[in-house]
Every structure is written in structure tokens, then in C-alpha cells.
Image (cartoon, rainbow, N blue to C red):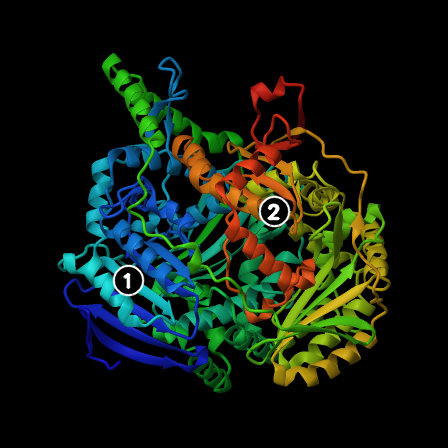
Amino acid sequence: YREGDTLHGFTVQKIVDVEDLNLTTIQLVHDKTKARYIHVARKDTNNVFSVAFRTTPMDHTGVPHILEHTVLCGSEKFPCRDPFFKMLNRSLSTFMNAWTASDYTMYPFSTQNSKDFQNLLSVYLDASFFPRLRKYDFMQEGWRLEHEDVMNPKSPIVFKGVVFNEMKGALQNQDYLFSVQLQRSLLPDHTYSYVSGGDPNHIPLLTWDALKQFHASHYHPSNSVFYTYGDIPLENHLKIINDEALSKFDAIETNTEVPFQTRWLEPRTKKVSCKPEPLAPNPAKQTTVSVSYLLKQNTEAYDNLVWNILSYLMLNGPQAPFYKALIESNIGLNYSPSVGFDAGIKETVFSVGLRGISEDDIDKVISKIDETIDRVIEDGFDQDRIDAVLHLIELSLKHQTTQFGLGLAANLMPTCVHDGDPVPTLQVNRMVDKFMVCELNGGQLLQDIVKTQLKDNKHRLVLVMNPSARQFNILCHYMTYNNLLKEKTVSLSEDEKKLIYEQGLSLLERQNEEEDLSCLPTLSISGWLNSSPHSFFNLITLGGTFVQFSNQPTNGMTYLTMFCSTANLPDNLKPYLPLFCDVLTKVGAGNRDYREISRDIERYSGGFFAGPTVFCHHSHGNKFEQGVMMNSYCLNKNLMNMLSIWEDIFTEPGLDDRDRLRTLVQVLSSNLSAGVVQSGHAFAMTSAASHLSAASQLKEQLTGLSQVNHIKNIAAKDDMDSLANVLTNIAAHVLSNSEMRCAVNVNPDDRPATEEVLEGFLSTLPLNSSDVDTHTEVDEFLPQQIKTHHEFPFPVNYAAMCFPTVPYTNPDEPKLRILARLLTNKYLHKEIREKGGAYGGGARHKDQVFSFYSYRFVDAPVAPSDKGSRIFYYGITDDMFQSYRRQLKSVSADDIVDVAQRYITPQKCAHAVSLIGPHNEVISKDSTWRKHKEE
């Protein structure tokens, strides 16, 4: 293509080759509507599309969020209910979703199949530009007044709606609440002062007409940015987009631009309330405080890069000045939410603070932040640390991921929706070179930025969030909510009440209607490849250890994975295994203290990871493998240095540093506590499954609520002497005498040198590698039919029901996998989300457990760094995988009915139920439930 070329109603404006990322960007504009278009041409079969609209709400009704849901409820060409969700059964997409940010709404998908791409593109275009926006869809997705029991006109009238219920839960999340309040308070003049997702106290003020008006003014091509990525020719996309959508519009003047925030003359302070955290290690330390600064426009790519470097230097790792001043002071548990540099809105923000502090320590934290800023201005940063950050940037350019195109879209869109040029953001090496020149010529760039944009910046907000159930209920939720409900219902006439009842029945009737889905495009099963590429690996022995080598185009990188069995670890030590893994790469080792270890990990690798794992056997239901998985990756030239760090960790881990352990325990406890609200469904499924098999029981112990409470208790007791002894004992079992195996993915040309260096490393380790089967076999475990209620003081219920099933190679496994997909998309979505108004619901089949909640199976692409992982982790060979795919393709409707009756019928199949949520009066009086209360 050439600049000035006209293609299907578009004119090419700018073409740039970006060698850093092996891609070419082509920017176009649609002649008739002035829609912007960004195409990224790259040799990648996982093609991506997205369309984004700048959506700038001026109230708390959540109109962009509700509109995002409602446009997906049917369109002119695809008039069935929720074509977006129904395409999940008719597509090979590797990603389908939509989301509402603070100032834009985005609709992306990705797929490896060109026909599938065309199908999904037609559905997305019609949904975005020609939605039906029916009143009943608005009521279902947004809000409505309806009887609690829709069939009983004498039951109480309440608020219902998918988004209404979603945001009720979201605003109970302390991290989300804090982030919302921070943005609202720091940018109070325009759209950012409103909750784009919607405040439940204001959502019922939104009208159907206002929703349609918002679509007309915001979902117009003149207010849009299109993005495509991959190896499908650009012309194919342009023709469909022009013919099916843009040619039917004319350009309009949009009124969605976000003005710059008026800068303050003096700093401000804001105090807000939240609910107390039931899993806090110290109930007296639940205050969060942060200091935030409004910076520059987000369209300046170089400024954003420099600020990302600066933010990392100031915050990340034990060498960072804020880490030393705040985290290692043990005043609080962890950094505050939204910490760091954020370029996700029109004007960028930097924020730093602490959570889990005493209210009496607020001023102390603020003083420490101010002192740290002064220290950075005075001392700057060591060149070694700056070099380490630049090394991480180099790694990020070489590291290949399967969703690179999707990630690119998400990263570029905040700039694009504010009329910025995306190309400079992609030219990373050019910006790094500019940064290095500035550093070499005086070396004061970062210190000057800290002085001018932090210390001298008057647009500074101190945000304090204190726990107070009473204040939170009064100011943030219940009083306003109840008053609004009372206001809308108290004066209802009998005729109006009758109308509410009839509308509820009418909506239910519509939700139950059988639909004609023939309008939707689909793929035949022949569109799914009969075979997938082989892994191309081989197994050798180096230094007495089994090593699986996979030759892959890793772009000058080496990827290392190590597995150490914990089958012989005493049971009383296993609850400490996640903590052991968390601290193992964060304490000192050998002659290096923890700061030096952190420095060298940054200089020579992309990071070190260790975590406990439980792998179910592919063919035996009562066998599983338990162990510690460790991995890292590096540039080939740094392999010897990376392995030197691992050698120190294996042979001389510094697990007796009590002060360091105390800091790491507090941080882990904070992270785990926050995760319960954020991932409640996962915890509920893990809890229920733990009663069905020994493997699932161990998983719950390592990753479930048991682990959250275990770490909470360790943090509360603060007995670091005993903890150091326990961790040292675990190290003696795991790092010295366990069975070990490795996997390495590397470019074929680099393999000989890699083998030589790796053999030297493995020869130094006191580990075993033999043909001994390291699987644990448990014959005596019997599934227990148990119902458990974990009572937490938040108003969201997370429920799960689980059934024991069969291993991977059992012929019923692919049938159960498809059953889960069908139940999710064809039944549970309608029953739980459409009718019940819950945000999500579904089923999954994984690791010999059928769980009811949400999960979706796709035949996804595999990155070069992950090739061979299937056999390394689970022992599943390529032949097993191909057999599994053939079985998937041969599953019939009768097969689905058969496995449903045999495996997931509660009346005759063993199962367990778990509920995480608030007090339930019925359950409290039911002796068949086990109750665990978290105060």
C-alpha cells in the first residue's frame, strides 16, 4: 500500500514499519464518516478485530456499561436474543468479549480461522451499529422494578437487572471502590467524576430513552476507532466494514471530547468509608491511604515510557525507594490499590500509598512518601537498576505471547480514543535510545521529573479510606438504595403495581421463548482442523536429570521449567508450601542478600516464579502428581547468569531472614484476602470439589479458603522463628532430596550451547531424577456429599456444585467437556443471567471434576515458550491429544444426555455444594449445611 491509496471507501494516511515488533502499521480514515482505522499487519494467525467508541458519561447511571450489555441482545441482521453469546457455540474464537472503561467502550474478538473472522465481524458490526435496543432488553440488562418472586404479585417489589447486580457486587470490593473514589476525586470536573460502570444508587434513574440517545450520539462511526491485526489481508476487512456498516452513515460532529482537568492551586484531601475486611490479619489495621498526582496527556508516548521506567524504579522490588520506605517499614500490609503510573485515561496519574495500616499512622505514611520523593530527587537511581529496567523492556519485545494482537489493542486504545498517534507507542527502541541519550547527558532526567511533576505538583490528592460498616451503609449503599426503592414504590397505584407484575411475567415469557437461530453464521465441524502441530520435543539426561527439550522459534530466548516432587513432603508441612514458594525467590541466597537477588533477577531474566502444583493423572482417577513448579526465561546470552541465581536458591536459600519473612507474609496475606471477593466463584468451586477426591482436597489446602485463613493466622501470630524453621525443613525436602525434571524451549541453533550450560548447572544440584513414578495414589478416598456455607459479611453470593467424574483418556471426558459448554451457553446463561439477573453463571469440566459456575473451552494457540507443556505437566502425548480431538468431533446429542444422567444428576450422583456469601436465615436453621463464619 501507499499513502493516499483509496480502498473500499477508506484512504490510507500513514504506513510505518516497526522493526522492533516485526509488524507494519497502516492508518486509514473512512472518507464518508471520518471513522479512524488502525491495521497491524504481522505474521500471526491469531487475527484480532475491535471497534471502540469514546463513551463519556455525565452521570452515575452506568449508561455506557448498560449499553455495552444491551447492544449484544440482538440486532437488525441477527434479531435473536443475545447473538453475541450464542456465537460461542458457532465459533472457534480464541477470545470474545466487550468492556466499558472510564472513557471508552471496546468490542474485541480474535480467531485463527478466516471464515470465523468474517462471521464474527458481521455479528460485531451489526451489534455495534444496528442494535435493536428493545425495552425488555434494557430492563433485563440494566434495571427494572419486579416482584422478588416474579410469579407472586404479593411478594416484595425490588430492583433487578444484570448490570445493577454486577455493580452492587463490584462496589463491595475495596480495591475497586478505592480506585473509583481516587479517579472521581482527582478529576472532578468532567466524565471521570462519574462511575462509568454505574452506581446502584443511580442506575434506576436511567431511562430507556436516555439509553437510546446515548447510543445515537456515541456509537456512531465518526466517534469510533477500528483496529485489526494479523495475517488476513487488510482489503478483506475494509470491504466488509464499509459494505455492512459504514457506508450507511454520514459524518457528524461528535461532542464526546474530554476537556483537560482544571489544575488545582492547592493539594486536597478526601476521606471515604468501606466495609471492614473479614480476613484482615489485624482488625485494627484496615485503613488505606494514598497520595496521587495528575500528570500529563496520555498521547505523549515518550513521556509515558519514561514514566513507566520511573514508576518501576520507585516501586518495584526491594531496591525501590518506596518499597524500602513503605513495605519494609511493616506499617501496613501492601501498596494501596491503583499504585503506580496509569495512562489509561486522557491525563496520566501517578499514585503511591499503603493499605492495612492503623488510622493513627496516616500522617506517618504521608511523611514517608514525601521524604522518599525528596530522597529520589537528591540521590537518583543506581545505573545498574536503570540498566535492569531497560533489560526488562528488551525482554518484553522478544517474548512472544499467543494474544499479542489483543494486548496491543488494549494498550493502544486509551491513546487512540483521544486522537493520539499509536505508532510512537510501538517504536520502543527509538524511545529507549532517546531516554539513554538524555540519561548520559547529565543523568538528571528522572530526578527532574520527580521534582517538577511530583514534589512541585499542586494537583495532589491524599485519599483515605477507613473501615466503617455503619458509615459505608449510610453513605455508599443501603440508605440511598432503600430510600430510592421506597421512593419508586411507595406511591405506586394498584394499576402501576399490576403493570410491574405483568411486565415481569412478559419478560419471563420472552426469556423462555424458543428462538430461530438460523440467522446466525456458523462453522461446520470440518472447519476445525483434524490435527494439530506436533510438539517436536525429545527427552535426554543432563547432569543426572531428565530434561525435555523442545526446539521452537523463541526469538533469542531460553525458557526453563523445573518440577520438584513433593510426594514425600510430610503432610503437616504441606499447608506452608504456597508460602515457601512465594518467598523462595524473594529472600537472599548464597552470598547474595535479598536486594542483590532481586537486582540480578531483573538484570538477567524476565522474572523467577515458583508455585505449588497438583496434576491429575491422565488415565487413573485415583492418582495425581504433586510438586513445586519453578520457571524463568532469559536472553540466550544471560543463561549462565540466570542459572547461577537458581543454583544459589537451590543450595543456600536465605530462609532464616526473619524481618524479610515478616514483610513477605504481610504482603501475601493482603493479596490473598483481596482475592476472595475478586475470585469468589473460584474459591467456591475449590471448596466444593475438595470433598470429592484426594487431589481436589490437596488443591483446596494449597489454593482455597483454607490457605487464605492459614496465611492470615501466620501473619497475625507473627512468630517468624517458628516459620523460618518450617520453611527450612521444607527446603530440605523439596530442594535437596526430591525427584526433579526439567523442560527447556529454545531455538534449535542455540540448543548445543544451552545443553552445555544446563548440564553444568544440574550437576551441582542435590536432586534425584529416576524412572520412579512420582504420582500419589489414593485408593481409600470416598466422595462426601456435603453442603458448606462460608459466611462472609458482603452482599454477594458465590455458589458452586461439583461432581466427581473421569480422567482425560476416558471416552466420557470429551463428552463431559462439551456438556459443560452446552449447559453454559444454552441453558445456564439464560436461567442464571437473563432470568436471575446474576452477572455470570455456567459450568466447566476440568481435572476430573464437573463444576457448575463458569468456564469455556477453546482450541487456543500455543506460544513457542509453552510448546511441550502438555506432556511435561500431565504426561499427555501428542497421540493422546489427537485421539481426544477425534473424540470431541464424534460426540452426539445422545452421548451428551447419557453422560449428564450418569455423572451430574444430583438425585443419584455424589456431589458437594459450597456457598460463599452473607448470612442466610434458611441455611442457618438447616442442619444439613456445615457453617463457617468469617467475622
Q: Residue at x 35, y 70 (%)?
A: 232
Q: Quadrant of the N terminus?
A: bottom left
In the rendered structure, which disc, 2 or 1, sits on the residue that comes first in sequence? 1
Front one among 908 and 277: 908
Mark in the foreground, 2 or 1? 2
How many numbered markers are drawn? 2
Amino acid identity at mark 2? Glu
Reading the image, the residue beneath label 1 is: 225
In the figure, is residue 436 to the left or right of 846? left
Amino acid identity at mark 1? Val
Reading the image, the residue beneath label 2 is: 813
Q: Residue at x 47, y 80 (%)?
A: 432
Residue 202 visible to the viewer: no
Front one among 815 and 5: 815
The tag on residue 485 is none
Q: Circle 1 sits in a helix, a strand or a loop, which is it?
A: strand
**Spot occupied by residue 721 in the image (x, y as percentages of width and height):** 83, 52
Give the quadrant of residue 418: bottom left
Front one among 240 and 883: 883
